[in-house]
Image (spheres, rainbow, N blue to C red):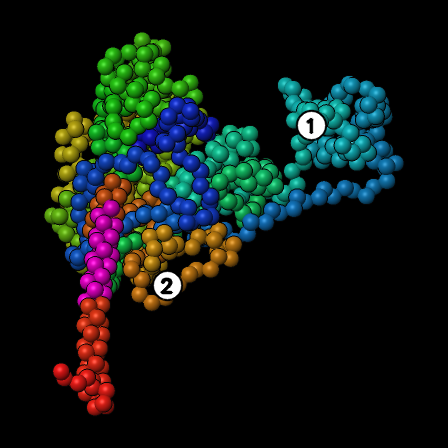
């Protein structure tokens, strides 16, 4: 995630980022052309690309350089339209999240005991005394504004429930009861119902479990933004919502969301006001959804304008199916800017160079809104935090503003400015650096040792399950979510780690021996490679030494990743080197127009939209893919294996423009050929007509009667 993602996340669910402020300020000031207009969720023909800054970071800059297969790649366009990229979450039990039901379940009705009032009054008199019961009666009748308190410290939970149910049975909605605790005493407080008191308007939760689960289907909006918009409509904090992870913005995605004790009807009413978001499949569960609590995702992807023979595509896909792909950390891990990739900030944080870290975060870069650019330029020129801070909107709560505010109010305390950020946000920069090292070692490992097992390669020990193994991979998306929604306070310096630490990660893996390899028990898909850390096992071969060499290039070592503050330390983690896709399917299709829909979403199928089939030969060709990936793997890294091209957004847009121009030239050439043929055909037809006329005239003349022939003078 780039700095732009951090800036949006820094709003902590309030939905007031720089972009929205900029768009509002732009109205009436000649900036309306820069506003992103909302578009209908269901009208694919209205889909257009937003005018957002594209990342200029290339794959080779983060050492994404190698390929598993040796076959020829082919050109195609990834995410030409957001409807070309579909993601469905797969939960921890292996179930796919598919929107199939948008009905709102009816709220259960409270079952009141059919007990005569006399018996209820007798029970209440026994539990709370007749005097208290009469006081409640006066309150219910509006004759008293007093609050009746009943000491229930010595009563059981069952008896307290009888008091609540009994008073509700006798006086209905005229009263409101609640249980309160003061010190070591417990009271039931009963007052007259007040419509203007939000607490009084609470309804008893009658659903079977406390957590409301529902599927969130969204189009061309990221998970954080969708949740923020729902929270604004429900007048609650975005942190009230829980989900297993974020899904792509430029896509159509479906995932599980949960919230504690919110009526489905209220949630549905709020979502109706939003564009590009639909919900459904309501259910109720006893526990909340946790970050990272998923097995993976199903991807359905269309590569448009595929420029290759069908035999080349089929060959590439078959090799892809058998050999898989290198499990690189994708470009999203390293930010949007080649000038300041996030791992550079991570290096400075790990080295304790706080001023350098702040300068990098505030450094000017391309693609920012004008006021962010102005803030960065002001800082670059003046190094005055207060002056730079004045360039930002009061609504801005991004990381840059947090740093500038701290510097302005704490006499340029650079260390404090970084450590004042939420812990998980700080650690994202460090995780980005770990990801860079992993990519570098993975690329060199493949170049020097090839696609084969070698002694010293690491594999998980035999008794660890696939789910446990997956949980020991650092998931940066989870870290980002924790950074945005958590209220973790900065760690205090000086917190010493325990004298003896249990080596959690070292016990997870073992190095392969020649005997292990010869046994055939393990395959190349079992190999894991570590992210660097202070408590990690490195491969017992040459690649193990590369980690320390690369860390040393940046003035670091594994020991330096053990920090004074325990929560700042990087113990390390393991990641599969190669991934073989599950349930991979593909087909080649033709389509007539660039705006044709090639993949139908959950929502479109639920509406009953019929998938159209192209009849005969169409001008364009696309490759449709369908596969499953574990949660920590990137679909873009899988696709680069078959395409053999850079998957960066900037490259894809350039390639799309080039292919479109080629297609246009092809059409024009065809039209020119047709035009030339038409002219030749017309000329030939004219010549034929002339010849026919001449022949007819000769024939007529030759067969005219003698008396009709002109006489010679």
User: Bounds of the magenta span?
Assistant: 657-680
Residue occupying image coordinates x 36% and y 39% = 50
Labelled pair 2, 1 in contact (Cβ < 8 Å): no
Q: Residue 494 location in percent, x, y?
A: 32, 18
Which quadrant: the C terminus?
Answer: bottom left
Q: Is residue 319 left or right of residue 36?
A: left
Is 481 a magenta residue?
Answer: no
Residue occupying image coordinates x 66% and y 41% = 206
Q: Cα distance, mark 2 to mark 1? A: 60 Å
Residue occupying image coordinates x 60% and y 46% = 104
The numbered disc on residue 664 is: none
View extreme (left): residue: 448
The numbered disc on residue 614 is: 2
Q: Residue 651 location in percent, x, y?
A: 23, 43
Location of residue 143 by image quarter? top right
Q: What kind of element bears circle 1? A: loop
212 vs 659: above or below: above
Which quadrant: the N terminus?
Answer: top left
Location of residue 581 by image quarter? bottom left
Q: Is residue 127 left or right of residue 13?
A: right
Is 670 a magenta residue?
Answer: yes
Q: Nearer the viewer, residue 425 or 504?
A: 425
Location of residue 34 by image quarter? top left
Mark 1 neighbour density, 10 Å: few (under 14) some (14–19) many (20 or more)? some
Which residue is labeled 1 in the image? Answer: 200
Q: Residue 319 location in percent, x, y?
A: 22, 60
Residue occupying image coordinates x 83% and y 41% = 115
Mark 2 neighbour density, 10 Å: few (under 14) some (14–19) many (20 or more)? few
Q: Nearer the viewer, residue 444 or 164?
A: 444
Residue 22 seen by the camera: no
């Amino acid at each position: 995630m780039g700095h732009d993602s951090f800036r949006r996340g820094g709003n902590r669910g309030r939905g007031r980022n720089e972009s929205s402020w900029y768009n509002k300020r732009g109205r009436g000031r000649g900036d309306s052309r820069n506003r992103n207009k909302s578009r209908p969720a269901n009208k694919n023909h209205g889909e257009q690309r937003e005018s957002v800054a594209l990342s200029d970071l290339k794959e080779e800059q983060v050492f994404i350089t190698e390929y598993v297969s040796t076959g020829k790649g082919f050109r195609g366009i990834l995410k030409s339209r957001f409807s070309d990229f579909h993601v469905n979450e797969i939960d921890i039990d292996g179930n796919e999240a598919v929107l199939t039901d948008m009905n709102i379940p009816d709220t259960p009705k409270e079952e009141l005991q059919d007990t005569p009032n006399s018996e209820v009054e007798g029970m209440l008199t026994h539990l709370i005394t007749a005097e208290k019961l009469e006081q409640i009666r006066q309150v219910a009748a509006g004759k008293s504004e007093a609050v009746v308190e009943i000491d229930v410290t010595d009563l059981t939970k069952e008896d307290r429930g009888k008091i609540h149910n009994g008073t509700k049975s006798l006086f209905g909605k005229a009263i409101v009861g609640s249980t309160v605790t003061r010190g070591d005493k417990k009271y039931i407080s009963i007052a007259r119902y007040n419509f203007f008191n939000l607490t009084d308007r609470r309804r008893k939760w009658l659903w079977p479990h406390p957590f409301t689960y529902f599927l969130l289907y969204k189009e061309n909006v990221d998970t954080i933004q969708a949740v923020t918009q729902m929270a604004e409509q429900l007048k609650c904090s975005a942190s009230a919502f829980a989900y297993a992870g974020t899904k792509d913005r430029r896509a159509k995605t479906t995932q599980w969301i949960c919230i504690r004790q919110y009526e489905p009807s209220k949630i549905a009413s709020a979502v109706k006001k939003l564009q590009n978001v639909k919900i459904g499949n309501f259910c109720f569960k006893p526990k909340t959804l946790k970050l990272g609590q998923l097995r993976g995702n199903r991807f359905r992807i269309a590569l448009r304008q595929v420029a290759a023979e069908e035999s080349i595509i089929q060959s590439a896909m078959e090799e892809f199916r058998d050999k898989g792909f290198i499990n690189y950390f994708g470009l999203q891990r390293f930010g949007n800017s080649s000038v300041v990739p996030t791992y550079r900030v991570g290096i400075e944080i790990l080295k304790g160079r706080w001023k350098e870290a702040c300068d990098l975060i505030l450094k000017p870069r391309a693609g920012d809104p004008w006021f962010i650019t102005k803030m960065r330029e002001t800082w670059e020129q003046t190094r005055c935090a207060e002056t730079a801070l004045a360039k930002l909107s009061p609504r801005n709560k991004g990381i840059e503003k947090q740093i500038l505010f701290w510097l302005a109010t704490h006499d340029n305390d650079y260390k404090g400015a970084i450590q004042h950020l939420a812990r998980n946000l700080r650690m994202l920069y460090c995780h980005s650096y770990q990801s860079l090292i992993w990519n570098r070692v993975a690329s060199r490992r493949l170049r020097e040792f090839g696609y084969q097992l070698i002694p010293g390669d690491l594999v998980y020990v035999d008794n660890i399950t696939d789910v446990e193994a997956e949980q020991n991979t650092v998931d940066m998306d989870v870290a980002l979510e924790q950074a945005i929604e958590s209220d973790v306070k900065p760690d205090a310096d000086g917190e010493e780690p325990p004298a003896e630490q249990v080596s959690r990660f070292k016990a997870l893996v073992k190095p392969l021996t020649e005997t292990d390899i010869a046994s055939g028990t393990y395959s190349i898909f079992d190999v894991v490679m570590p992210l660097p850390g202070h408590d990690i096992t490195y491969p017992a071969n040459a690649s193990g030494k590369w980690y320390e060499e690369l860390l040393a290039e940046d003035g670091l070592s594994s020991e330096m990743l053990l920090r004074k503050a325990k929560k700042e330390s990087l113990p390390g983690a393991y990641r599969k080197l190669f991934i073989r896709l599950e349930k991979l399917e593909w087909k080649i299709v033709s389509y007539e127009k660039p705006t044709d829909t090639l993949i139908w979403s959950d929502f479109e199928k639920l509406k009953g939209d019929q998938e159209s089939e192209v009849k005969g030969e169409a001008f364009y060709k696309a490759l449709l893919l369908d596969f499953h990936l574990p949660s920590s793997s990137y679909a873009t890294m899988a696709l680069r294996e078959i395409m053999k091209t850079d998957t960066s957004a900037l490259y894809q847009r350039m390639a799309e423009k080039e292919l479109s121009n080629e297609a246009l030239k092809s059409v024009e050439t065809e039209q020119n050929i047709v035009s030339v043929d038409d002219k030749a055909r017309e000329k030939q037809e004219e010549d034929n007509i002339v010849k026919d006329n001449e022949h007819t005239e000769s024939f007529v003349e030759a067969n005219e009667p003698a008396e009709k022939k002109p006489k010679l003078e």
